[in-house]
Image: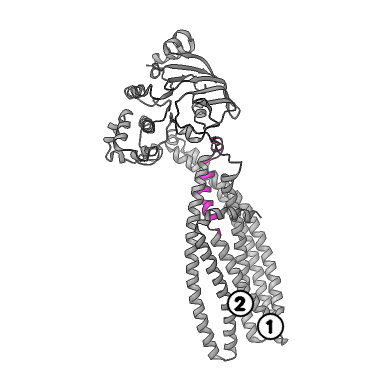
């Protein structure tokens, strides 16, 4: 039942190729018919040879030749249509899985390694996409070989009964093998996910690993994980090795006993020598049925395992998806409010009964020690996480009621560690605006103090910046992220330590760029450098998930000792 349920879901991704599926089934049926007829004709050829009926032998040989040519053409069409079906199904499955991964709640992504998603997106989708070809091919071969049973049944029922019993015995062995192999495969895929995720971390963190001189520690951990996955693979192969040896021994015994049985029937006068030759010649095809039944069972088990792993991400509650409302704000002003908001990361309570209001086109800064909840406020405003209790509103509407575009289409965040993609500088900027003009791009980069650096590069704006922006400095990545935000031009701009990696001169330029945006955007700034936010309309001073004080820079210096200490400490460092 699980197989048919998964097959029904998979059909949703394959049905675009309905015409090719019909052709695939049609040619498969033709292949079955040809494969049933050919053994019968071959049996007649052997009988004609033993009876010295050479005219009939030549006639049968010509017909078989024509049938085999037809089978080659049919096989070609089966392969062609199956490859088209595979291509379309594989593409649609990958796109759907990729879409659903981007919809996952951040908690789900935080609690799973990247290997979980990489393995399922690349490996499991491929296995599912091949299901139609694998199942129908094996079924076709099984049905074809059943024709051999029909021929043997007509020739001698005693031999037929013997082969049926031996086939059942071999099938039982194969059934046990496939089930045990499948159990080992579940463990193998889990271990593979651990290895893939860890390799990804090594690649992304290679610079830090080198700087920490920790190569040996990471290689030891990698070796440990690789050893586990290879041990699991070996256990899989051990299952196959043991049961295939047992199956081979049973088949050898079957062949020996068949020879004895045929000799006995010939001597007893119940079977002619020519008929015995036909049976002996095709007895191997009888055994092949078990091979293909085993492959079919393995294909079904593999399909179910891959389907469950993929459809869990797409449909199950285990991999929860982000949820948005249906209300759409056509024109966002930029007013928002936190009302008695509570939030925690697991057991770590970050925000505690937090309340504040921000007016449209106001520039507000958040300051406080690390862990006070500043970045969390930004994450909640963008609905990267849902509040535990309380309410957040944009233009008076609870963000739980707003659709995704009303929230994220109107908010741009420039984080402390912005992620830039392994594309050219131009393509990184076009990600937020497909129809970006050259003049818009250059203006944004000039405002972000990045243009002069870009034009100094050999390929200018077409320079590939490497995975994660590896070819850029920390400050250059932040300026690129700022340029990206300026191009997006949303009503609400969030700067999360966006100038932390910049030198004083560049920071001054970025501060000027932010000042130029005032009164046109609602701007929120998180900054440890208080000198960057002294011109803010308001400053909210956070501590332990609550607002201790708020007001202008001048007011807080006069009225709040903790804020004053932070500012004086910064002056001392400078």
User: Residue at label 2?
Assistant: 282
Residue extending furthest toward the top: 558
Mark 2 residue element: helix
On screen, residue 483 versus residue 364, left or right, reads: left
Please report the residue visible at 58 percent of the width from the left and 69 percent of the height from the top: 141
Q: Position of residue 430 (x, y in %)?
A: 36, 39
The answer to whether residue 371 is visible is no
**Residue 77, disc:** none
Going from N to C along the chain, the mark reached first, 2 or 1, is: 1
Query: Which of 113 and 378 lies nearest the eye of the viewer?
Result: 378
- At 59% across and 72% down in the image, what residue appears? 144
Residue at image position (64%, 52%) is 183
Q: Which residue is mark 1?
A: 263
Tell me the chief SS of the magenta region: helix
Would you say 516 lies left or right of 346 here? left
538 left or right of 443 in image: right
Locate the C terminus by quadrant. Answer: top left
Label 1: few (<14), some (14–19) or many (≥20) C-alpha neighbours in 10 Å:
some
- Residue toward you, 473 or 85: 85
Residue 7 x %, y %: 59, 55
**Who's the residue at 50% across and 66% down the image?**
78
Residue 246 falls in which quadrant of the image? bottom right
């Amino acid at each position: 039942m699980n197989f048919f349920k998964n097959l029904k879901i998979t059909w949703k991704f394959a049905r675009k190729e309905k015409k090719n599926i019909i052709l695939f089934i049609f040619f498969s049926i033709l292949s079955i018919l040809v494969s049933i007829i050919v053994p019968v004709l071959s049996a007649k050829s052997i009988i004609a040879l033993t009876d010295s009926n050479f005219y009939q032998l030549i006639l049968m040989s010509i017909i078989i030749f024509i049938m085999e040519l037809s089978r080659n053409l049919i096989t070609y069409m089966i392969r062609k249509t199956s490859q088209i079906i595979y291509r379309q199904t594989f593409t649609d499955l990958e796109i759907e899985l990729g879409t659903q991964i981007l919809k996952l709640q951040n908690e789900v992504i935080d609690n799973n390694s990247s290997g979980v998603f990489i393995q399922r997106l690349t490996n499991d989708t491929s296995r599912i996409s091949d299901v139609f070809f694998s199942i129908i091919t094996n079924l076709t071969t099984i049905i074809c070989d059943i024709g051999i049973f029909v021929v043997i049944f007509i020739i001698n029922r005693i031999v037929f009964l013997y082969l049926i019993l031996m086939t059942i015995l071999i099938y039982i062995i194969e059934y046990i093998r496939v089930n045990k192999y499948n159990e080992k495969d579940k463990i193998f895929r889990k271990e593979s996910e651990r290895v893939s995720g860890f390799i990804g971390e090594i690649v992304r963190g290679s610079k830090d690993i080198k700087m920490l001189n920790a190569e040996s520690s990471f290689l030891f951990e990698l070796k440990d994980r690789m050893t586990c996955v290879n041990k699991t693979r070996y256990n899989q192969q051990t299952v196959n090795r043991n049961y295939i040896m047992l199956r081979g021994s049973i088949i050898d015994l079957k062949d020996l006993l068949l020879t004895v049985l045929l000799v006995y029937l010939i001597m007893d006068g119940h079977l002619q020598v020519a008929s015995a030759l036909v049976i002996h010649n095709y007895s191997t095809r009888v055994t092949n049925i078990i091979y293909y039944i085993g492959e079919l069972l393995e294909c079904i088990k593999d399909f179910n395992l891959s389907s469950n792993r993929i459809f869990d991400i797409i449909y199950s509650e285990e991999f929860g998806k982000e949820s948005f409302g249906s209300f759409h704000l056509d024109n966002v002003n930029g007013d928002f409010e936190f009302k008695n908001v509570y939030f925690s990361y697991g057991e770590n309570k970050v925000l505690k009964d937090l309340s504040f209001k921000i007016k449209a086109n106001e520039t507000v800064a958040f300051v406080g020690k690390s862990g006070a909840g500043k970045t969390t406020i930004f994450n909640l405003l963008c609905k990267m996480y849902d509040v535990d209790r309380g309410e957040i509103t944009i233009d008076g509407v609870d963000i739980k009621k707003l659709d995704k575009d009303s929230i994220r289409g109107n908010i741009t965040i420039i984080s402390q560690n912005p992620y830039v993609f392994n594309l050219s500088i131009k393509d990184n900027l076009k990600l937020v605006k497909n129809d970006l003009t050259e003049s818009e791009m250059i203006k944004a980069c000039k405002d972000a103090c990045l243009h002069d650096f870009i034009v100094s590069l050999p390929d200018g704006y077409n320079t590939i910046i490497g995975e994660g922006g590896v070819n850029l400095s920390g400050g250059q990545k932040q300026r690129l992220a700022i340029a990206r935000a300026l191009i997006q031009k949303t009503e609400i701009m969030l700067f999360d330590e966006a100038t932390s990696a910049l030198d004083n001169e560049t920071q001054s330029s970025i501060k000027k760029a932010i000042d130029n945006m005032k009164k046109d955007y609602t701007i929120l700034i998180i900054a440890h450098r208080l000198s960057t936010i002294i011109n803010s309309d308001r400053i909210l001073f956070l501590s332990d998930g609550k607002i201790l004080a708020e007001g202008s820079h001048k007011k807080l210096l006069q009225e709040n000792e903790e804020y004053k200490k932070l500012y004086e400490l910064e002056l001392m460092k400078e």
